[in-house]
Amino acid sequence: MKIGIDKIDFYTPPQYLDLVDLAHARQVDPNKYLIGIGQKKMAVAHLDQDIVAMAANAAEKILTPADKQALGLVIVATESGVDQSKAAALFVQQVLQLTTNLRAIEIKEACYGATAGLQMAKDFVQCHPDKKALVVASDIARYGLNSGGEVTQGAGAVAMIVSVDPHILALEDQSIYQSQSTGDFWRPNYSTEAFARGKYSEEVYLQMFSDIWQQASSQKMTQTEQLQALLFHIPFSKMGRKGLKTLEDKLATADYQRLLQRFEQSIIYGQDVGNIYTGSLYLSLLSLLENDSTLQVGDRIGLFSYGSGSVAELFFGQLQPDFKKYLTPLVHQELLKQRKQLTLVEYENIFRQKLVTDGSTQKLSQSDCNAPHYLTKIQDHERFYK
Ligand code: CAA
């Protein structure tokens, strides 16, 4: 039985900061951001586009009435959760008017959360082949003004439907995974910004990729003549490039060049959106599928997922007949093109905005006219959405 990604889409807020402007403001050579980090723009979210609203806006686009009826599991993966108790998936269930006959939960493990969700959804569908699962990765990456990680911020959500006989990518059963407690990146409950040991986090990412690749190779899972593309978690595109570079000496030149060419297609969306934490790997998948015209039905793709703290996994999937029919590259190119460019002052003002925490009422206006869902108000410590 084939199980995998049946549909995929994404949402990102309609405004961004150009990283050349950020570089000038922080008195950094723009090439450090453009080449050294490998990013061009970062999406900036207003308060009304929190991770619930973004998740609903991404999922809305792929759910037909029949899909909604078939859902048995809804997972929102996030490391920017809005409640310590109630799952973001329950808010999403409510705003999308989904059936009540489903499990709605939230998963957290830094940028790995959506992969945990995807694997759980696959197992769920294996047990309940008549049902579908919705997995949404939604995050706002915040490191703070003037911080080392500031240039690697971003905001957005990727939604996927998982089902039997998927239209896009059938997932293989076998994968290699690894977990180990590390202090490379974390965000305590009391902080709205993440803390990172930046260079150490890069080391752990690369070490876990290397260990996992070696294990996968010894189990003959990585024969590169079969591997048409290799995708990475992309906190910033240079990180994935460093991961791929570790294979340069291990692969035949033609195989490495093919993976490198496809890697370039996989970072196009992420370079304009920024880090969306748990959605980043899946934004890379969408970017590859929509920007590379050479991929064929049956091509095998590897996906390397990394979440700080740290959990990593390498898994594989095969492109399905008609996968191209289920993609909307023009819509996504337009979505990115239509965004408003913020000035540095506008970006800093949005960054400093905060929701009330004293139980008073705060009403919010809709910042994205094209997005149906947004946070409308906070009242008595509760969130309300349209
Ligand atoms: N032209 C071209 N390149 C330049 C340059 C210039 N003028 N100036 C500097 N560079 C290059 C540097 O040589 C360096 O390249 P290498 O990494 O290849 O050595 C690169 O730009 C970055 O410069 P720095 O070494 O000075 O790095 P930094 O101190 O500014 O920190 C960072 C960079 C560590 C990524 C920091 O932005 C950070 O902490 N980010 C958040 C943490 C993170 O994303 N970690 C990734 C792994 S963890 C993960 O993946 C989970 C997650 O999503 C958070």
Image: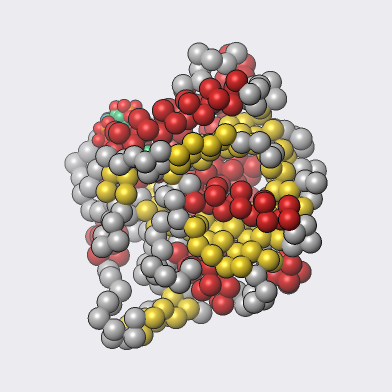
Residue at x 37% of width, y 53% of height: 141
Q: Quadrant of residue 372?
A: bottom right
Residue 49: x percent and y percent? 43, 68
1 vs 40, left or right, is right
212 vs 351, left or right, is right
Residue at x 59% of width, y 26% of height: 216
- Can residue 302 be seen in this snapshot? yes
Residue 72: x percent and y percent? 68, 66
309 vs 146, left or right, is right
Residue at x 57% of width, y 68% of height: 104
- 160 or 338: nearer the viewer: 160
Q: How many marks?
A: 0
Indicate which quadrant contains ligand 1. top left
Residue 64: x percent and y percent? 72, 68
- Can residue 268 be seen in this snapshot? no
Above or below, 316 relative to 166: above
Above or below, 289 relative to 76: above
Residue at x 44% of width, y 44% of height: 307
- 341 or 195: nearer the viewer: 195
